[in-house]
């Protein structure tokens, strides 16, 4: 049995025992692909322990999956169909996508994101944003979970216009904020500490899935800050994960409620705001990897506090809600070191780019690059040139366009795929007059 099937079968078997007659609970984790024939084999605690031990031995010597060069990975946009839509909380909704061309989706690393594109019916223009994947990395579908943001263009388009059977365009999963396969496959891996607030739970859920697919003997701590039960996406299944696995694996779930309602709290839950000091106090140490996702203030305070408490700065990573433009609803910024040195900034952040003329050939518009602009995308938007954008940090590749003439440079190399003669408009700055195919 493959590791992924083992993990799914444990959940399916446990869900079957705990939720007999509850179709919603079984559907939540989408284990329909497992037949009932597998369930009896995993109803015994001894059977689970035996398979778990075997899996741990196998995972230690497993080859690192080459996600970047997977044969089914694609470049550019690809059509996908909406298989299901599910409300996870009053303002958070999950969308499950499946291929429309018969070719399987490639696996990804837990924590990575999906760039999605829709046409805005009111303007006729394409809108693209990036959302963390909340599904398991080796599932046959992709799932994103989107929080409706007042005034947010893409989040409201998804909530208001997308339903089962609709089609949407997506790019292959990307992102530097992800689960570390190398650490997991080491003989004695350090603890994996996942810290989330609100919709920031989505990449953590994917990383939790991958961690348990890789091995079940690693210490994994999930710290989840919520307001109350009603407003917390995935809280119910996360509680069941803890209930099912804490006795036989290294998984521990720690919940903090800022404004609990009646009957919200269970033994072990905490009231108040999560802090670095409380995390370290609960762990009893400051070792391991720390991956953080949530509102900017939450992440900054937690990251800085963990470092002050003794955590290594290069082991504390976080992902923000949106790129430099603070795009609403996006979970797309590559993980970054909260202690980055300003002296590392490249000279392309100087004013050398200011004043160069930028022409968009297809639309027949041009303007000068102005002070304060982050890249050619800002020029395009100032001229109302229709260019896709997502992360606005050089990571997703949505804004890549052909550079017909001229030269550009980057503060740091873009993470997305870019070929000779192309430019990543959100982070490319001109060093001459440039002409862009847009």
Image (cartoon, rainbow, N blue to C red):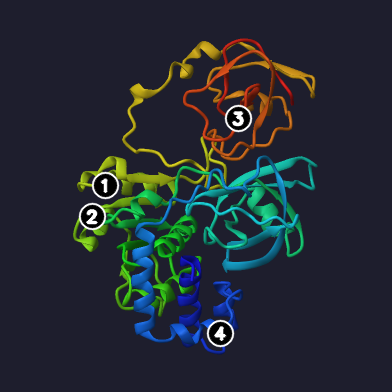
Judging from the image, what secondary structure is the residue with disc 3 in? Answer: loop
22, above or below 164, in the image: below
Q: CA distance from mark 2 to mark 3?
A: 42 Å
Count of marks overlaid on the render: 4
Classify mark 2: helix, strand or loop: helix
Q: Nearer the viewer, mark 4 or mark 2?
A: 4
Residue located farthest toward the bottom when viewing the structure as drawn: 21
Q: CA distance from mark 4 to mark 2?
A: 47 Å
> Marks 1/2: CA distance?
7 Å
Query: Of the residues under marks 4 and 2, which one precedes in the sequence?
Result: 4
Q: Is residue 364 above or below residue 259?
A: above
Nearer to us: label 3 or label 1: 3
Circles 3 and 4: CB distance less than 8 Å? no
Estimate the x, y position of residue 43 in percent, counting from the top left: 43, 86
Asked whether disc 3 touches disc 1, contact meaning CB atoms under 8 Å apart, the reply is: no
Q: Are marks 1 and 2 in contact (CB under 8 Å)?
A: yes
**Residue bearing the label numbered 4:** 37
Left or right position of 239 against 151: left
Name the mark on residue 305.
1
Between marks 3 and 4, how big is the CA–CA gap? 47 Å
Q: Position of residue 173 (x, y in %)?
A: 57, 48
What residue is disc 2 on? 277
Provide the residue designation for mark 3.
418
């Amino acid at each position: 049995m493959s590791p992924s099937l083992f993990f799914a079968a444990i959940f399916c078997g446990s869900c079957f025992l705990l939720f007999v007659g509850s179709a919603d609970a079984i559907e939540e984790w989408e284990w329909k692909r497992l037949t009932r024939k597998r369930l009896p084999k995993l109803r015994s605690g001894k059977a689970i322990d035996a398979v778990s031990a075997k899996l741990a031995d196998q995972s230690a010597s497993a080859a690192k999956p080459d996600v970047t060069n997977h044969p089914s990975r694609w470049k550019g946009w690809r059509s996908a169909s909406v298989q299901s839509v599910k409300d996870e909380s009053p303002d958070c909704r999950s969308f499950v996508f499946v291929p429309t061309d018969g070719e399987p989706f490639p696996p990804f690393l837990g924590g990575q994101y999906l760039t999605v594109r829709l046409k805005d019916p009111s303007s006729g223009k394409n809108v693209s944003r990036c959302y963390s994947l909340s599904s398991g990395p080796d599932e046959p579908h992709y799932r994103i979970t989107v929080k409706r943001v007042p005034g947010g263009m893409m989040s409201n388009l998804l909530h208001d216009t997308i339903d089962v059977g609709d089609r949407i365009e997506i790019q292959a999963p990307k992102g530097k904020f992800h689960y570390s396969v190398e650490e997991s496959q080491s003989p004695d891996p350090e603890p994996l500490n996942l810290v989330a607030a609100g919709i920031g739970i989505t990449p953590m859920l994917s990383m939790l899935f991958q961690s348990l697919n890789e091995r079940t003997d690693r210490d994994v701590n999930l710290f989840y800050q919520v307001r109350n039960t009603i407003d917390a996406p995935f809280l119910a299944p996360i509680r069941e994960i803890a209930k099912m696995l804490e006795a036989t694996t290294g998984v521990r779930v720690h919940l903090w409620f800022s404004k609990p309602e009646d009957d919200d709290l269970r033994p072990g839950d905490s009231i108040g705001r999560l802090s670095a000091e409380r995390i370290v106090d609960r762990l009893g140490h400051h070792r391991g990897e720390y991956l953080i996702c949530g509102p900017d203030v939450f992440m900054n305070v937690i990251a800085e506090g963990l470092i002050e408490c003794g955590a290594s700065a290069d082991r504390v990573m976080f992902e923000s809600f949106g790129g430099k433009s603070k795009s609403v609803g996006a979970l797309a910024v590559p993980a970054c070191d909260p202690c980055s040195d300003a002296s590392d900034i490249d000279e392309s952040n100087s004013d050398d780019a200011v004043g160069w003329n930028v022409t968009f050939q297809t639309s027949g518009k041009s303007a000068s690059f102005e002070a304060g602009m982050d890249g050619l995308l800002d020029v395009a938007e100032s001229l109302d040139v229709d260019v896709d954008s997502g992360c606005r940090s050089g990571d997703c590749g949505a804004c890549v366009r052909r550079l017909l003439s001229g030269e550009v440079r980057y503060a740091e190399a873009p993470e997305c795929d870019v070929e000779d003669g192309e430019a990543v408009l959100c982070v490319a700055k001109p060093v001459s007059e440039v002409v862009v195919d847009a």
